[in-house]
Amino acid sequence: MGFHRTALLFTIAVLSLTQSQAAADRPDAVPRVHIPQRIVDLGISPPGLKPSGKFIIGNTGSAHLNIIELKPSCGCTVAEPETKTIAPGDEVVVAVTIDPRGKGGSYLKTVTVETDDPEEPVVEVVITGEVSITEHGETLERSVIFTGKCASCHAEPASGKKGEPLFEAVCAMCHGHYGLGGPAARINDLKFLESNDDSYIRATIENGVPGTSMPAFAEDAGGPLDAAQIDSLVELIRWWEQGYVFKDNRSYIRGAR
């Protein structure tokens, strides 16, 4: 009796798998990506500890879903799926890890998920969290973000750029596009601009801000920017005080005023 029951269950499982495969092989079968959680908060972590989390990629379609690429916004972020092929009705876990070196305070990263879903081939998942700063002050090796994998987004994009293109390349990821705010402070802000002169803004860019994740960008401090590039950022930021934000080399949007 036990043997026959086992054989029956095995037969049912095989038939179910065969039917599922047949459905997935239909000419009209299509995959459908489903990511229920598109903002992943890794919480507060101490310096030196790599925060980690996960998100789910499901397939609600009738064909196998293939993950073409998982592309983090920064080299400090790693996203690893259990598998890159998802059967209809199934899901996979994507493990996410952040390298906290050089970070202090809030951070915001993204993982761009590219699949062969014909209707929604690209989905962006936001990764947020905070690296705590000790009460004893500056403990961060902030210049580390200009080396290794992190250089691909914090240093190399600065090459050959000045002004607005330079800001968007290496500053906007923290201060927001056009300085309008992000994980770090909004600097396209009338109160900030009226309260701080050019020398303060220049010194902040050159030397960073102790006790925060704002690094020293000047070349002689280990950063990627030369004096002319830093001057171009000061000029851009001061221009915002007049009420202008340069956009796409063609048009303007309203600035601090």
Image (cartoon, helix red, strand yellow):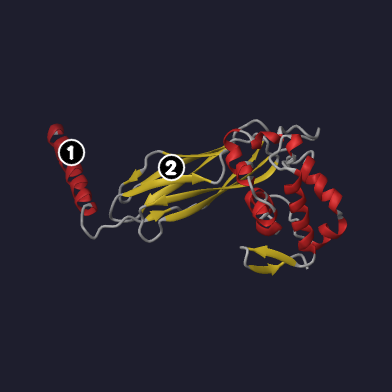
Q: In this picture, is 102 found above or below 109? A: above
The residue wearing badge 1 is 10
Q: Amino acid at mark 2?
A: Val
Task: Specify which label sits upstream in the sequence, 1 or 2.
Answer: 1
Quadrant of the snapshot with the N terminus: top left
Relative vertical location of residue 144 with respect to residue 58 in this rendering, above or below: above
Q: Percent x, y for residue 66? A: 34, 48
Q: Observer-nearest residue: 158 or 146?
A: 158
Distance Cα–Cα, label 1 vs label 2 = 28 Å
Tell me the SS state at disc 1.
Answer: helix
Q: Quadrant of residue 163?
A: bottom right
The residue identified by callout 2 is: 93
Answer yes or no: is residue 17 visible: yes
Q: Residue at x 70, y 35 (%)?
A: 143
In which quadrant is the C terminus drawn? Answer: bottom right
Q: Nearer the viewer, residue 250 or 149?
A: 250
The spot of residue 56 in percent (x, y) is: 44, 47
119 horizontally vs 161: left or right: left
Residue closest to the eye, 33 or 186? 186
The percent position of residue 175, horizontal first and vertical second, equals 69, 52
The residue located at (78%, 34%) in the rendering is 138
